[in-house]
Image (cartoon, rainbow, N blue to C red):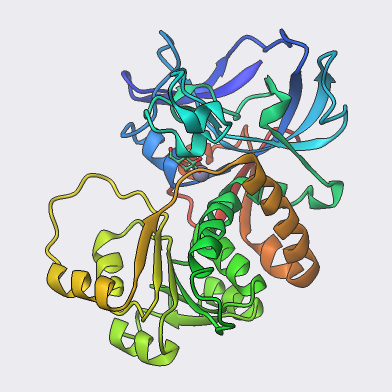
Amino acid sequence: MKAMAVFKNSREIGIIEHPEPKITTPTEVKVQILEVGACGTDREICTFEYGTPPGSDDYLIIGHESLGKVVEIGSAVSDVKIGDLVVIMVRRPCHHAGCQPCRAGRQDFCTTGDFIERGIKQAHGFLTEYVVDDQKYMIVVPPELKNIGVLTEPLTIAEKALGQVKIIQSRLPWNLHHSAVVLGAGPVGLLGAMALTSRKFKTFVYSSELPSDQKAQLVEKMGATYISAKTHSIEALAKVVGNIDLVYEATGSPSLSFDIIKVLGINGIFIFTGIPGHKDPIASDLALIMRNMVLKNQDIFGSVNASHENYQDAVRDLVFFQKHWPSVIEQLITNRLSIESDSIKEVLCGRMGGIKNVIQWLA
Ligand code: BGC
Ligand code: ZN
């Protein structure tokens, strides 16, 4: 079968022939891949800065934002059936007996760092014709989500983060009207904004695009407010929002993030989701930030990857988004390209533009 592979050593990317996987245990499922989304992590892998092939292979099959159709099931499979649409989870547990999160199926909190990620770290990914994996790593997607089901994995980032916000905010048992600022209007930011708006946060998206940009219009259509960094300084943003109860960072920019942290409100929560590359040290007013954290009861945390439950929550939210904001969620996918397209490398290497770009196997 065909697969899209990245050769780190020879710095090449291209379609290769790869053996078609077979079901080998009773709980495995064979999935025909329909679509794969591309994100910043793929860009890093395709520019040879990130990503590790499995075992002794000299290439990594890329792709971790999946949507596929079940075509074969092992004899003991009960969670999915042939014909189901499924999304396959990214992370697999480490092998250490003492890693409690991994042993409990919560490899998103792995403590050893030896977890495996399909399409990213030591396991082949999903930009291939067929994938076999255990049923416990599959999430069924209802047929009405066929057009947007590929957004499940990027939405899990918000699901995991907002699950933790709920726990933190339980320290404030008053019925506050929470405000949230999302930094960045890429797919992670826009999906985060939808998740926050649907949870009744008064949501603002702060990003570099002009207010006339399509992304700004999508923000307004979901009932959130777009504030352009071109027209509003950080101080002006803080004035518009009032007490900033929550910041959901989705830019990967350390300088912007630590400037915004300075205006985080009383009892505020700041969530990092972006993964910046290695940069030279950047100066910031650490005494101010530390003073605020203490005197304003602030919480600052980072969040990566997601649990099976977070994937299920993402599917549930996608159903809600499709019902309430169908044009917004569908317009998040700006390009759908066939695997045969000449622009595949542009998409994977992040040079395509648009919001979420998706690669398809079938016409
Ligand atoms: C993926 C996560 C993964 C992270 C770090 C992200 O793009 O969505 O599943 O844990 O990269 O490799
Ligand atoms: Zn991703």
**Could you tell me which residue is drawn at 66 percent across and 45 percent down?**
309
Q: Position of residue 267 (x, y in %)?
A: 39, 76
Residue 121 placement, left or right of 142: left
Q: Quadrant of the C terminus?
A: top right
Residue 284 placement, left or right of 193: left
Q: Position of residue 12 (x, y in %)?
A: 39, 24
Q: Position of residue 175 (x, y in %)?
A: 59, 83
| Quadrant of residue 27 within the rendered picture | top right
Up/down of 168 relative to 262, above or below: above
**Could you tell me which residue is drawn at 50 percent across and 38 percent down?**
108
Residue 16 shows up from this direction: yes
**Could you tell me which residue is drawn at 53 percent across and 41 percent down?**
343
| Quadrant of residue 326 within the rendered picture | bottom right
Residue 20 placement, left or right of 6: right
Q: Quadrant of the N terminus?
A: top right
Up/down of 75 relative to 289, above or below: above
Up/down of 29 relative to 228, above or below: above
**Could you tell me which residue is drawn at 71 percent across and 59 percent down?**
317
| Quadrant of residue 139 within the rendered picture | top right
Residue 354 shows up from this direction: no
In the foreground, 212 or 190: 190
In the foreground, 168 or 287: 168
All told, the count of numbered labels is 0
